[in-house]
Image (tube, grey):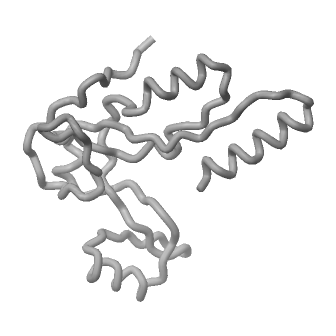
Amino acid sequence: MIGYMLQQSMQEALREAGLDRPVATVLTQTLVDGDDPAFTNPPEKPIGPFYTAMQARRLESEKGWRMVRIPGQGSRRVVPSPRPVALVEERAIVCLFSAGTIVIAAGGGGVPVVADGGGTSGGASRRSWTRTSPRPSLPGSSAPKTS
């Protein structure tokens, strides 16, 4: 949703400036290591909206979410925050950018995914933070450039 709002604002600003430039938002999957220590430690990264204490208790019970109370604001879901390895959509983003498109991607770090044995990815948010099985890289993915 944030990508959509950024794209709408960028398109409006470009239009007002008389510039004809395409803008695209890419829902980005961020490859993470299934053995990342973030999965063995209690989750710490708050995500999503604030909930009342009653709503938080219900979500913990019904969905198994871990919630943290933030004084004066309510409760939020917390999830593991593993270190990013690569962007699954890297090639698509590069193609769009090379064609002159303004690309909005990796909002909030992207959706974390781990590679399974078949080279496909699965959502890391469904992983238990106690899981320690090794996970290979996705075919065609590369580590982020450091320079």
Q: Which residue of the protein is positioned furthest toward the bottom in this rendering?
A: 54
- Identify the residue shown where x is 44% and y is 43%: 110
Above or below, comparing residue 38 to residue 136 in the picture? below
Residue at the extreme top of the image, as rendered: 147
Q: Is residue 71 left or right of residue 124?
A: right
Residue 136 versus residue 100 in the image, above or below: below
Residue at the left extreme of this rendering = 133
Which residue is at the front of the view, 58 or 95?
A: 95
Seen in the image, is 140 located left or right of residue 74?
left
Report x, y in % for residue 138: 24, 30
Toward which corner of the image does residue 114 lie, by quadrant?
top left
Give the position of the N terminus as an image quadrant.
Answer: bottom right
Q: Is residue 78 left or right of residue 25?
A: left
Q: Where is residue 97 in the image (x, y as percent from the top left)?
A: 60, 22
**What residue is rendered at 38% in x and 22% in y?**
144
Looking at the rendered image, the quarter that the C terminus falls into is: top left
Q: How many marks?
A: 0
Query: Which of the 4 quarters of the picture holds residue 129?
Result: bottom left
| Residue shown at the point (40%, 47%) measured from the top left | 111
> Percent from the top left, x then y, of residue 7?
69, 43
Residue 17, relative to residue 40: is it above or below?
above
Q: Which of 11 and 55 is in front in this view?
A: 11
> Which percent across, then down, holds residue 30?
37, 38
Residue, x 41% and y 88% (percent of image)?
A: 54
Q: Which of 108 and 29 is in front in this view?
A: 29
**Residue 82, picture quadrant:** top left
- Left or right of 57 in this view: 130: left
